[in-house]
Image (tube, grey):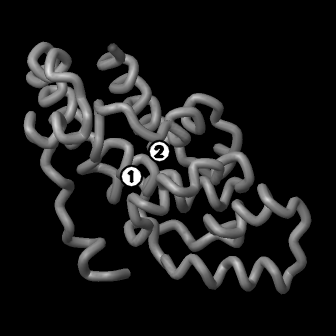
Amino acid sequence: MSEQSVTSAPRPFPSREELRQRGTRKEAIAELYDVWLAAHAEAMKLAERLRTVFGDPPRPKITLHVARGYDDEWNLSEERIQELTALDPEQHWTEVSAESTQRFQEYFTFSDAEGWRFYLPAFLRHYLAEFPLPGWDAVYRACVERKHFDLITPEQVAFIDEFLSLCHAWEE
């Protein structure tokens, strides 16, 4: 596990100016900024518990690129799976970048229970880091659908329920 992934603190919530530069309407910023800050603070409290709740699950056979391969190619040989797996060097979910979780939004559709157990906390971490701003919502949909929860522990299910409650409490 890289040292940076272990020690990096979540980014602070964007300033009003940063939001304006991203294209957020001035009226929305004026009306909702303080609400967004409060929602983000709650999200960060939840995110602080991710490592404790999700721990160190083993790396799955279906990595991000392998899932994309199933999406694009449908049938993958063992050799092709090895090629695609090599494109995902992460050995721990904390090493999965925000860019990867954004680029591989289809992951939960083409994964299995082992993949969910490994990648779910990474997707949750990056979703919570931007909360409550609109963004990529594959992890939200995955948590609602609970398709591959076979290996998710009761403590993790409780965390996911808290995550969904947070999302619903702050919906606009």
Q: Position of residue 32 (x, y in %)?
A: 16, 18
Q: Residues within 10 Å of mark 2 (few under 14, many from 20)?
A: some
- Residue at the spot x=27%, y=72% of the render? 6
SS for callout 2: helix
Distance (Cα) linking label 2 and label 1: 6 Å
| Image position of 145 (left or right of 39) | right
Q: Position of residue 169 (x, y in %)?
A: 32, 17
Residue under numbered circle 2: 156
Q: Residues within 10 Å of mark 1 (few under 14, many from 20)?
A: some
| Image position of 172 (left or right of 116) | left
Of residue 159 and residue 19, the one placed in the foreground of this image is: 19
- Residue at the spot x=60%, y=80% of the render? 87
Q: Earlier in the sequence, mark 2 or mark 1?
A: 1
* As drawn, 40 above or below 152: above
| Image position of 23 (left or right of 50) | left
- Residue at the spot x=33%, y=57% of the render? 52
Question: Label 1 near label 2: C-beta < 8 Å?
Answer: yes
SS for callout 1: helix
Of residue 87 and residue 147, the one placed in the foreground of this image is: 87
- Amino acid type for the residue under numbered disc 1: Val
Q: Which label number is shown at residue 107?
A: none
Q: Position of residue 104 (x, y in %)?
A: 57, 56
Quadrant occupied by the N terminus: bottom left
Residue under numbered circle 1: 53
* As drawn, 82 above or below 129: below
- Residue at the spot x=20%, y=67% of the render? 8
Of residue 98 and residue 29, the one placed in the foreground of this image is: 29
| Image position of 171 (left or right of 27) | right
* As drawn, 85 above or below 169: below
Q: Position of residue 43 (x, y in %)?
A: 25, 37
**Number of numbered tags placed on the structure image:** 2
Of residue 5 and residue 29, the one placed in the foreground of this image is: 29
